[in-house]
Amino acid sequence: MDYMGKIKESLKYIEKRCNKKPKIGLILGSGLGSLGDKIESPTIIPYDQIPNFPISTVEGHKGQLVIGELGDKTVIAMQGRFHYYEGYPLKDVVFPVRVMMSLGIENLIVTNAAGGVDENFSPGDLMIIKDHINFTGENPLIGDNLDDLGPRFVDMTRAYDKELIDLAKKAGDRLDIPLKEGVYMWFTGPTYETPAEIKLAGILGASAVGMSTVPEVIVASHQGVKVLGISCITNMAAGILNKPLNHEEVIETSMMVKEKFEKLVIEILTSM
């Protein structure tokens, strides 16, 4: 079965399980998946039940779709995403996003856990992503173009929607939640970056680094879906504090800020 056929098969299965028509998609990153538990009247579909879906293998990722109501909006949330470092081809990494867009979402909120490069950041900060740097040399659009979904060459000038960024900032102001703003740089992982790589990232203009998000944003741009990106700064990147990095710290910091993060996203949804 070709890629479009797989998307349609997955779509058909999800529509059979749930007749709601979400207009907003959420991708919940490491340690941030608890927001999906707040979705009301949920239809929960584990990834391993959906035809053609990959399986999430990373701690802190539940591995299921949740469709229901949040912030007075009908949403579809990925509790757990897929990463290139898990060994999946990028077309598989972004496959669930393709399916969500085929369901009819018009806006996508992507979240992640990230390492802070900007020395004005602190663990626990929330950063609105204003732009990204793809440092991997990889791209999910390499290969035959899916002409039914989008153009061969994709403009990335406004990959992160200015109106959604302004809306998020206003939500932060209303809740008295200070928000950082910066550029996210994508590394493949699964190794954390070296101090030299972090120094280079800073020179190139990165505010934070991570191992996800960019492939999903690329395919959203391909299909004309508006994107808002939010990073949870879970640690300062290698070489800044001269301390070892580990995934446990990422999850621990995410859990510490989850209440603030959840309030912010719900406030954003309410005002969309």
Image: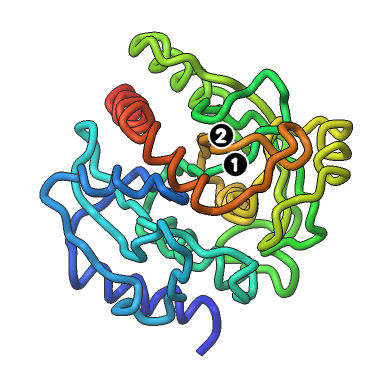
Instruction: Name the element at disc 2.
Output: strand
Question: Which three-letter amino acid code belongs to the residue tagged 2?
Answer: Ile
At x 29% / y 30%, what residue is drawn? Answer: 266
Task: Tell me the colour scheme of the image.
Answer: rainbow
Q: On the image, which quarter does residue 10 sit in?
A: bottom left
Residue 37 point in image, percent of width and height: 22, 48
Left or right of 272? Residue 189 is: right
Q: On the image, which quarter does residue 114 sit in?
A: top right
Residue 110 point in image, percent of width and height: 49, 44
Tell which of 220 and 27 is nearer to you: 27
- Residue with the mark numbered 1: 114
Left or right of 243? Residue 171 is: left
Asked whether residue 122 is in view, the answer is yes
Tell which of 168 and 199 is nearer to you: 199
Residue at mark 1 to residue at mark 2: CA–CA distance: 5 Å
Question: Which three-letter amino acid code belongs to the residue tagged 1?
Answer: Ala
Give the number of the disc on residue 174: none
Residue 183 point in image, percent of width and height: 70, 32
* Above-or-below relation of 18 to 76: below
Tell which of 178 and 255 is nearer to you: 255
- Residue with the mark numbered 2: 233
Left or right of 158? Residue 262 is: left
* Neighbours of disc 1 within 10 Å: few (<14), some (14-19), many (20+): many
* Above-or-below relation of 21 to 139: above
At x 18% / y 70%, what residue is drawn? Answer: 17
Asked whether residue 272 is in view, the answer is no
Left or right of 15? Residue 265 is: right
Q: In the picture, which quadrant includes the C terminus? A: top left
At x 86% / y 37%, what residue is drawn? Answer: 199
